[in-house]
Image (spheres, grey):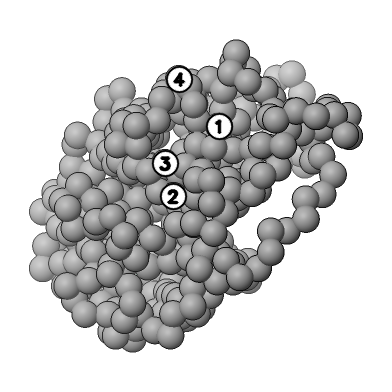
Amino acid sequence: MSAAFGVLAAAAPAPARGPPLGTRHRASSSPSVAFGSRPRGASSSSACRAFTPAGAKIAGVGMSVPAQFLTNDDLASLVDTNDEWIRTRTGIGKRHVISGDETLTSLAAEASAKALEMAGVNARDVDLVLLATSSPDDAFGSACTLQAAIGAEGALAFDITAACSGFVVGVINGVHFIRGGGFKNVLVVGADVLSRYVDWRDRGTCILFGDGCGAMVLTAVPDPNDCCLLGFDAHSDGEGNHNLTASCVASVSARGESKPRAEDASAASAFAGFDNIAMNGQEVFKFAVRTVPDTLGKSLKAAGMDDASEIDHLVLHQANQRIIDGAAKKLKVPAEKVVSNIEKYGNTGAGSVPIAIAEAVEEGRIKEGDVVATAGFGAGLTWASAILRW
Ligand code: UT7
Protein backbone atom coordinates (compact mmCIF):
# COMPACT_ATOMS: atom_id res chain seq x y z
CA MET A 1 0.00 0.00 0.00
CA SER A 2 1.46 3.36 -1.05
CA ALA A 3 0.10 6.85 -0.66
CA ALA A 4 1.03 10.48 -0.64
CA PHE A 5 -0.16 13.47 1.31
CA GLY A 6 0.87 17.08 1.43
CA VAL A 7 2.23 18.52 -1.79
CA LEU A 8 0.51 16.05 -4.11
CA ALA A 9 -2.69 15.92 -2.10
CA ALA A 10 -2.92 19.70 -2.33
CA ALA A 11 -4.42 19.43 -5.80
CA ALA A 12 -7.23 17.15 -4.66
CA PRO A 13 -10.45 18.56 -3.18
CA ALA A 14 -11.14 17.78 0.50
CA PRO A 15 -12.91 14.41 0.71
CA ALA A 16 -16.60 14.40 1.54
CA ARG A 17 -17.12 13.37 5.15
CA GLY A 18 -19.34 10.41 5.90
CA PRO A 19 -21.77 9.78 8.73
CA PRO A 20 -20.64 9.78 12.38
CA LEU A 21 -18.23 6.94 13.06
CA GLY A 22 -18.66 6.14 16.71
CA THR A 23 -18.07 7.57 20.13
CA ARG A 24 -14.63 8.26 21.50
CA HIS A 25 -14.50 8.02 25.27
CA ARG A 26 -12.63 10.65 27.22
CA ALA A 27 -12.06 9.94 30.89
CA SER A 28 -11.08 13.47 31.82
CA SER A 29 -12.91 16.75 32.10
CA SER A 30 -11.46 17.93 28.80
CA PRO A 31 -14.12 18.60 26.14
CA SER A 32 -15.68 15.47 24.73
CA VAL A 33 -16.05 14.97 21.01
CA ALA A 34 -18.77 12.36 20.61
CA PHE A 35 -18.81 11.34 16.98
CA GLY A 36 -21.79 9.02 17.29
CA SER A 37 -24.12 10.56 19.79
CA ARG A 38 -24.84 13.97 18.26
CA PRO A 39 -28.05 14.05 16.20
CA ARG A 40 -27.60 14.85 12.51
CA GLY A 41 -28.03 18.51 11.77
CA ALA A 42 -27.38 19.65 15.35
CA SER A 43 -25.15 22.67 15.22
CA SER A 44 -22.01 22.50 17.31
CA SER A 45 -18.64 23.96 16.59
CA SER A 46 -16.91 21.01 18.30
CA ALA A 47 -18.76 18.47 16.13
CA CYS A 48 -17.72 20.40 13.04
CA ARG A 49 -14.16 20.55 14.28
CA ALA A 50 -14.13 16.78 14.72
CA PHE A 51 -14.70 16.30 11.02
CA THR A 52 -12.61 19.13 9.70
CA PRO A 53 -9.62 17.65 7.88
CA ALA A 54 -6.37 18.93 9.28
CA GLY A 55 -2.72 18.90 8.36
CA ALA A 56 -0.09 17.43 10.66
CA LYS A 57 3.38 18.41 11.78
CA ILE A 58 6.10 16.78 13.86
CA ALA A 59 6.31 18.81 17.06
CA GLY A 60 8.79 16.94 19.25
CA VAL A 61 10.88 13.82 19.72
CA GLY A 62 12.58 12.10 22.64
CA MET A 63 14.42 8.89 23.46
CA SER A 64 15.40 6.70 26.37
CA VAL A 65 17.65 3.67 26.86
CA PRO A 66 18.29 1.60 30.00
CA ALA A 67 21.21 2.48 32.26
CA GLN A 68 22.95 -0.90 31.95
CA PHE A 69 24.71 -2.00 28.76
CA LEU A 70 26.57 -5.06 27.50
CA THR A 71 29.71 -4.69 25.39
CA ASN A 72 30.78 -7.18 22.74
CA ASP A 73 33.45 -8.38 25.17
CA ASP A 74 30.73 -9.01 27.77
CA LEU A 75 28.95 -11.26 25.26
CA ALA A 76 32.20 -13.03 24.40
CA SER A 77 32.15 -14.29 27.97
CA LEU A 78 28.70 -15.83 27.37
CA VAL A 79 28.99 -17.32 23.85
CA ASP A 80 31.68 -18.17 21.33
CA THR A 81 32.03 -14.77 19.67
CA ASN A 82 34.35 -11.78 19.65
CA ASP A 83 34.31 -8.01 19.22
CA GLU A 84 35.89 -8.13 15.78
CA TRP A 85 33.27 -10.54 14.35
CA ILE A 86 30.33 -8.59 15.78
CA ARG A 87 31.63 -5.20 14.55
CA THR A 88 32.51 -6.48 11.08
CA ARG A 89 29.27 -8.41 10.51
CA THR A 90 26.82 -6.02 12.21
CA GLY A 91 28.44 -2.69 13.18
CA ILE A 92 27.32 -3.16 16.78
CA GLY A 93 29.63 -2.22 19.68
CA LYS A 94 27.27 -2.43 22.65
CA ARG A 95 23.58 -2.70 23.53
CA HIS A 96 21.56 -1.51 26.54
CA VAL A 97 19.41 -3.94 28.55
CA ILE A 98 16.85 -3.23 31.26
CA SER A 99 17.65 -4.02 34.88
CA GLY A 100 16.21 -3.32 38.32
CA ASP A 101 12.95 -1.36 38.20
CA GLU A 102 13.20 -0.52 34.50
CA THR A 103 10.32 -1.68 32.31
CA LEU A 104 9.07 -1.03 28.82
CA THR A 105 6.59 1.44 30.32
CA SER A 106 9.25 3.32 32.30
CA LEU A 107 11.45 3.71 29.19
CA ALA A 108 8.47 4.81 27.12
CA ALA A 109 7.37 7.31 29.77
CA GLU A 110 10.82 8.92 29.85
CA ALA A 111 11.06 9.23 26.06
CA SER A 112 7.47 10.50 25.85
CA ALA A 113 8.03 13.17 28.50
CA LYS A 114 11.03 14.47 26.52
CA ALA A 115 9.05 14.52 23.26
CA LEU A 116 6.13 16.34 24.90
CA GLU A 117 8.48 18.88 26.44
CA MET A 118 10.11 19.61 23.06
CA ALA A 119 6.65 19.90 21.50
CA GLY A 120 5.42 22.20 24.25
CA VAL A 121 2.38 19.94 24.63
CA ASN A 122 0.90 19.15 28.03
CA ALA A 123 0.25 15.41 28.51
CA ARG A 124 -3.37 16.27 29.39
CA ASP A 125 -3.80 17.60 25.84
CA VAL A 126 -2.74 14.34 24.17
CA ASP A 127 -5.71 12.77 22.37
CA LEU A 128 -4.11 9.50 21.28
CA VAL A 129 -1.20 7.33 22.43
CA LEU A 130 0.03 4.77 19.89
CA LEU A 131 2.61 2.43 21.39
CA ALA A 132 4.45 0.30 18.83
CA THR A 133 5.98 -2.66 20.61
CA SER A 134 6.40 -6.42 20.49
CA SER A 135 7.46 -6.69 24.12
CA PRO A 136 4.79 -5.02 26.28
CA ASP A 137 4.85 -5.34 30.06
CA ASP A 138 1.42 -6.98 29.86
CA ALA A 139 -0.08 -9.32 27.26
CA PHE A 140 -3.00 -6.90 26.93
CA GLY A 141 -0.61 -4.11 25.95
CA SER A 142 1.26 -1.29 27.65
CA ALA A 143 -0.17 1.80 25.93
CA CYS A 144 -2.64 2.36 28.78
CA THR A 145 0.00 2.07 31.49
CA LEU A 146 2.11 4.52 29.48
CA GLN A 147 -0.91 6.83 29.26
CA ALA A 148 -1.30 6.68 33.06
CA ALA A 149 2.45 7.09 33.68
CA ILE A 150 2.64 10.35 31.70
CA GLY A 151 -0.76 11.69 32.81
CA ALA A 152 -2.36 11.71 29.36
CA GLU A 153 -5.67 11.18 31.08
CA GLY A 154 -7.88 12.23 28.17
CA ALA A 155 -6.21 10.06 25.55
CA LEU A 156 -7.27 6.87 23.84
CA ALA A 157 -4.26 4.54 24.08
CA PHE A 158 -3.52 1.27 22.33
CA ASP A 159 -0.62 -0.89 21.17
CA ILE A 160 0.49 -1.54 17.62
CA THR A 161 2.31 -4.82 16.96
CA ALA A 162 4.31 -4.62 13.75
CA ALA A 163 7.73 -5.58 15.14
CA CYS A 164 10.60 -3.42 13.87
CA SER A 165 8.30 -1.69 11.36
CA GLY A 166 6.02 -0.65 14.24
CA PHE A 167 7.14 2.94 14.67
CA VAL A 168 6.85 3.79 10.97
CA VAL A 169 3.42 2.11 10.91
CA GLY A 170 2.55 4.12 14.04
CA VAL A 171 3.49 7.43 12.41
CA ILE A 172 1.42 6.58 9.32
CA ASN A 173 -1.53 5.78 11.63
CA GLY A 174 -1.02 8.87 13.77
CA VAL A 175 -1.04 11.20 10.78
CA HIS A 176 -4.21 9.54 9.47
CA PHE A 177 -5.97 10.05 12.82
CA ILE A 178 -5.06 13.74 12.76
CA ARG A 179 -5.97 14.23 9.11
CA GLY A 180 -9.36 12.59 9.67
CA GLY A 181 -10.19 15.27 12.24
CA GLY A 182 -10.94 15.06 15.96
CA PHE A 183 -7.40 14.22 17.12
CA LYS A 184 -5.08 17.16 17.71
CA ASN A 185 -2.07 15.78 19.55
CA VAL A 186 -0.94 12.22 18.90
CA LEU A 187 1.95 10.62 20.75
CA VAL A 188 3.61 7.85 18.72
CA VAL A 189 6.05 5.69 20.65
CA GLY A 190 8.33 2.91 19.42
CA ALA A 191 9.69 0.78 22.24
CA ASP A 192 11.05 -2.70 22.80
CA VAL A 193 12.77 -4.63 25.57
CA LEU A 194 13.65 -7.63 23.44
CA SER A 195 16.35 -8.66 25.93
CA ARG A 196 13.45 -10.39 27.72
CA TYR A 197 13.19 -12.86 24.81
CA VAL A 198 16.83 -13.20 23.81
CA ASP A 199 18.39 -16.64 24.18
CA TRP A 200 21.70 -15.67 25.74
CA ARG A 201 23.16 -18.99 24.55
CA ASP A 202 22.44 -18.24 20.86
CA ARG A 203 25.32 -16.28 19.34
CA GLY A 204 23.30 -15.74 16.14
CA THR A 205 20.80 -13.47 17.94
CA CYS A 206 22.08 -12.41 21.37
CA ILE A 207 24.68 -10.09 19.84
CA LEU A 208 22.04 -8.12 17.93
CA PHE A 209 19.27 -6.98 20.24
CA GLY A 210 19.13 -4.17 22.76
CA ASP A 211 16.40 -2.33 24.65
CA GLY A 212 15.29 1.22 24.03
CA CYS A 213 12.51 3.62 23.18
CA GLY A 214 11.84 6.70 21.07
CA ALA A 215 8.78 8.95 20.93
CA MET A 216 7.34 11.54 18.55
CA VAL A 217 4.55 14.08 19.05
CA LEU A 218 2.40 14.80 15.99
CA THR A 219 0.22 17.89 16.13
CA ALA A 220 -2.64 19.08 13.94
CA VAL A 221 -2.22 22.23 11.86
CA PRO A 222 -5.19 24.00 10.24
CA ASP A 223 -4.12 23.65 6.59
CA PRO A 224 -4.93 20.10 5.37
CA ASN A 225 -2.30 20.48 2.66
CA ASP A 226 0.42 21.11 5.23
CA CYS A 227 1.43 17.56 6.16
CA CYS A 228 4.68 16.15 7.54
CA LEU A 229 3.95 12.78 5.88
CA LEU A 230 4.85 13.40 2.25
CA GLY A 231 4.47 9.79 1.14
CA PHE A 232 4.44 6.27 2.57
CA ASP A 233 4.45 2.59 1.65
CA ALA A 234 3.67 -0.40 3.89
CA HIS A 235 3.48 -4.21 3.50
CA SER A 236 3.20 -7.54 5.30
CA ASP A 237 4.04 -11.10 4.30
CA GLY A 238 2.90 -13.75 6.77
CA GLU A 239 4.38 -16.47 4.54
CA GLY A 240 7.79 -15.42 5.86
CA ASN A 241 6.71 -15.37 9.50
CA HIS A 242 8.75 -18.45 10.45
CA ASN A 243 12.00 -16.60 9.72
CA LEU A 244 11.77 -14.45 12.86
CA THR A 245 9.63 -15.54 15.80
CA ALA A 246 9.14 -15.47 19.56
CA SER A 247 6.29 -17.98 19.63
CA CYS A 248 3.63 -18.37 22.27
CA VAL A 249 4.20 -21.42 24.44
CA ALA A 250 1.51 -22.85 26.67
CA SER A 251 0.88 -25.98 28.70
CA VAL A 252 -1.54 -28.64 27.42
CA SER A 253 -4.40 -27.28 29.52
CA ALA A 254 -3.71 -23.70 28.53
CA ARG A 255 -3.75 -24.71 24.85
CA GLY A 256 -7.26 -26.06 25.34
CA GLU A 257 -6.38 -29.64 24.39
CA SER A 258 -8.05 -30.88 27.55
CA LYS A 259 -10.47 -29.31 29.94
CA PRO A 260 -8.52 -27.60 32.74
CA ARG A 261 -9.06 -29.35 36.04
CA ALA A 262 -8.77 -27.63 39.38
CA GLU A 263 -5.51 -29.46 40.14
CA ASP A 264 -4.05 -28.29 36.78
CA ALA A 265 -4.89 -24.66 37.28
CA SER A 266 -1.61 -23.47 38.74
CA ALA A 267 0.45 -25.50 36.24
CA ALA A 268 -1.60 -24.20 33.32
CA SER A 269 -1.11 -20.58 34.19
CA ALA A 270 2.58 -21.11 34.95
CA PHE A 271 3.18 -22.31 31.39
CA ALA A 272 1.76 -19.42 29.38
CA GLY A 273 4.43 -17.20 27.86
CA PHE A 274 6.63 -16.56 24.85
CA ASP A 275 9.61 -18.51 23.65
CA ASN A 276 13.06 -17.05 22.91
CA ILE A 277 13.66 -15.14 19.69
CA ALA A 278 14.48 -17.54 16.85
CA MET A 279 15.81 -16.08 13.60
CA ASN A 280 16.97 -17.31 10.25
CA GLY A 281 19.50 -14.49 9.97
CA GLN A 282 20.48 -14.99 6.38
CA GLU A 283 16.87 -15.09 5.14
CA VAL A 284 15.95 -11.97 7.11
CA PHE A 285 19.08 -10.26 5.79
CA LYS A 286 18.12 -11.08 2.19
CA PHE A 287 14.52 -9.96 2.81
CA ALA A 288 15.77 -6.60 4.19
CA VAL A 289 18.22 -5.96 1.37
CA ARG A 290 15.44 -6.67 -1.15
CA THR A 291 12.52 -4.80 0.43
CA VAL A 292 14.10 -1.67 1.95
CA PRO A 293 15.25 0.02 -1.29
CA ASP A 294 12.02 -1.09 -2.95
CA THR A 295 9.70 0.37 -0.30
CA LEU A 296 11.70 3.59 -0.10
CA GLY A 297 11.53 3.93 -3.87
CA LYS A 298 7.72 3.63 -3.67
CA SER A 299 7.49 6.18 -0.84
CA LEU A 300 9.70 8.64 -2.73
CA LYS A 301 7.50 8.24 -5.78
CA ALA A 302 4.36 8.76 -3.65
CA ALA A 303 5.98 11.95 -2.33
CA GLY A 304 6.50 13.15 -5.89
CA MET A 305 10.27 12.64 -5.80
CA ASP A 306 12.09 11.02 -8.71
CA ASP A 307 14.85 9.63 -6.52
CA ALA A 308 16.54 10.03 -3.12
CA SER A 309 18.52 13.11 -4.16
CA GLU A 310 15.82 15.32 -2.59
CA ILE A 311 16.10 13.82 0.88
CA ASP A 312 18.34 15.26 3.60
CA HIS A 313 18.58 12.19 5.85
CA LEU A 314 18.13 8.43 5.56
CA VAL A 315 17.07 6.86 8.87
CA LEU A 316 16.61 3.09 8.59
CA HIS A 317 15.79 0.49 11.20
CA GLN A 318 19.13 -0.17 12.87
CA ALA A 319 19.37 -3.94 12.37
CA ASN A 320 22.74 -4.33 10.69
CA GLN A 321 25.18 -1.71 9.36
CA ARG A 322 25.61 -3.80 6.23
CA ILE A 323 21.86 -3.56 5.50
CA ILE A 324 21.95 0.22 6.05
CA ASP A 325 25.01 0.64 3.81
CA GLY A 326 23.55 -1.64 1.11
CA ALA A 327 20.26 0.29 0.99
CA ALA A 328 22.04 3.65 0.94
CA LYS A 329 24.25 2.47 -1.93
CA LYS A 330 21.30 1.20 -3.95
CA LEU A 331 19.38 4.46 -3.42
CA LYS A 332 22.55 6.49 -4.13
CA VAL A 333 22.36 8.27 -0.77
CA PRO A 334 25.79 9.59 0.23
CA ALA A 335 27.23 8.48 3.59
CA GLU A 336 26.90 11.95 5.15
CA LYS A 337 23.11 11.73 4.80
CA VAL A 338 22.88 8.31 6.48
CA VAL A 339 21.99 8.31 10.17
CA SER A 340 23.43 5.37 12.10
CA ASN A 341 23.74 4.76 15.82
CA ILE A 342 23.74 0.96 15.71
CA GLU A 343 27.25 0.95 17.20
CA LYS A 344 25.86 2.30 20.50
CA TYR A 345 22.47 0.59 20.81
CA GLY A 346 22.27 -2.48 18.54
CA ASN A 347 18.84 -3.46 17.23
CA THR A 348 16.22 -1.96 19.56
CA GLY A 349 13.23 -3.25 17.57
CA ALA A 350 10.44 -0.69 17.27
CA GLY A 351 12.63 1.73 19.21
CA SER A 352 15.42 1.98 16.68
CA VAL A 353 13.98 4.45 14.13
CA PRO A 354 12.65 6.99 16.67
CA ILE A 355 15.83 6.73 18.76
CA ALA A 356 17.92 7.48 15.66
CA ILE A 357 15.65 10.40 14.69
CA ALA A 358 15.60 11.82 18.24
CA GLU A 359 19.38 11.64 18.53
CA ALA A 360 19.91 13.27 15.14
CA VAL A 361 17.54 16.09 16.16
CA GLU A 362 19.26 16.49 19.53
CA GLU A 363 22.65 16.73 17.80
CA GLY A 364 21.27 19.46 15.50
CA ARG A 365 21.70 17.21 12.50
CA ILE A 366 18.02 17.06 11.52
CA LYS A 367 16.74 20.64 11.28
CA GLU A 368 13.40 22.29 10.58
CA GLY A 369 12.31 21.81 6.98
CA ASP A 370 14.60 18.80 6.39
CA VAL A 371 13.21 15.79 4.55
CA VAL A 372 13.78 12.46 6.30
CA ALA A 373 13.36 9.12 4.51
CA THR A 374 12.76 6.33 7.00
CA ALA A 375 12.03 2.60 6.83
CA GLY A 376 11.36 -0.22 9.24
CA PHE A 377 11.46 -3.95 8.53
CA GLY A 378 11.36 -7.17 10.51
CA ALA A 379 9.18 -9.85 12.04
CA GLY A 380 5.77 -10.52 10.63
CA LEU A 381 7.25 -10.18 8.14
CA THR A 382 6.51 -6.48 7.88
CA TRP A 383 8.14 -3.53 6.13
CA ALA A 384 7.14 0.10 5.83
CA SER A 385 8.65 3.41 4.84
CA ALA A 386 7.74 7.07 5.08
CA ILE A 387 9.05 10.36 3.74
CA LEU A 388 8.72 12.92 6.52
CA ARG A 389 9.26 16.64 6.58
CA TRP A 390 10.66 17.81 9.91
O1 UT7 B 1 15.13 -6.48 13.39
C1 UT7 B 1 14.88 -7.62 12.67
C2 UT7 B 1 15.67 -7.68 11.48
N1 UT7 B 1 16.81 -8.54 11.68
C3 UT7 B 1 17.83 -8.48 10.84
O2 UT7 B 1 17.81 -7.66 9.95
C4 UT7 B 1 18.95 -9.47 10.97
C5 UT7 B 1 19.45 -9.83 9.59
N2 UT7 B 1 20.56 -10.80 9.63
C6 UT7 B 1 21.79 -10.43 9.99
O3 UT7 B 1 22.04 -9.30 10.38
C7 UT7 B 1 22.92 -11.44 9.83
O4 UT7 B 1 22.42 -12.55 9.15
C8 UT7 B 1 23.56 -11.90 11.18
C9 UT7 B 1 24.33 -10.77 11.80
C10 UT7 B 1 22.48 -12.39 12.13
C11 UT7 B 1 24.51 -13.05 10.92
O5 UT7 B 1 25.53 -12.62 10.00
P1 UT7 B 1 25.89 -13.50 8.73
O6 UT7 B 1 26.96 -12.78 8.02
O7 UT7 B 1 24.62 -13.75 7.98
O8 UT7 B 1 26.46 -14.79 9.37
P2 UT7 B 1 25.99 -16.30 9.12
O9 UT7 B 1 24.73 -16.58 9.83
O10 UT7 B 1 26.08 -16.60 7.66
O11 UT7 B 1 27.15 -17.09 9.82
C12 UT7 B 1 28.49 -17.07 9.31
C13 UT7 B 1 29.37 -17.80 10.30
C14 UT7 B 1 28.82 -19.15 10.74
O12 UT7 B 1 29.91 -20.02 10.95
P3 UT7 B 1 30.29 -21.11 9.84
O13 UT7 B 1 29.08 -21.98 9.70
O14 UT7 B 1 30.62 -20.34 8.61
O15 UT7 B 1 31.47 -21.82 10.46
C15 UT7 B 1 28.18 -18.84 12.05
O16 UT7 B 1 28.10 -19.96 12.91
O17 UT7 B 1 29.51 -17.02 11.46
C16 UT7 B 1 29.14 -17.82 12.60
N3 UT7 B 1 28.56 -16.93 13.58
C17 UT7 B 1 29.29 -16.28 14.49
N4 UT7 B 1 30.60 -16.25 14.74
C18 UT7 B 1 31.04 -15.47 15.74
C19 UT7 B 1 27.27 -16.60 13.74
N5 UT7 B 1 27.12 -15.73 14.75
C20 UT7 B 1 28.38 -15.53 15.24
C21 UT7 B 1 28.89 -14.74 16.27
N6 UT7 B 1 30.21 -14.75 16.49
N7 UT7 B 1 28.07 -13.98 17.04
Mark 4 to mark 2 CA distance (whole Å): 22 Å
Q: In which quarter of the image is the N terminus?
A: bottom right
Disc 4 or 2, which lies upstream in sequence? 2
Q: What element carries label 4?
A: loop
Q: Name the residue under label 4.
A: 151
Of residues 262 and 215, the one drawn nearer to the viewer in this rendering: 215
In this picture, residue 87 sits left or right of residue 217: left
**Residue shown at 75% from the left, 28% from the top:** 44
Tags 2 and 3 touching, CB below 8 Å: no
Upstream in sequence: badge 2 or badge 3: 2
- Mark 1: amino acid: Asp
Q: Is mark 1 on a helix, strand or loop?
A: loop
Q: Name the residue under label 3.
A: 217
Q: Residue at the spot x=33%, y=77% of the render?
A: 310
The amino acid marked with disc number 2 is Lys
| Beta carbon at label 3 within 8 Å of ligand 1 | no
Secondary structure at badge 3 equals strand
Mark 3, residues whose alpha carbon is within 10 Å: few (<14), some, or many (≥20)? many
Mark 4–mark 1 distance (CA, rounded to whole Å):
12 Å
Q: Are marks 3 and 4 in contact (CB under 8 Å)?
A: no
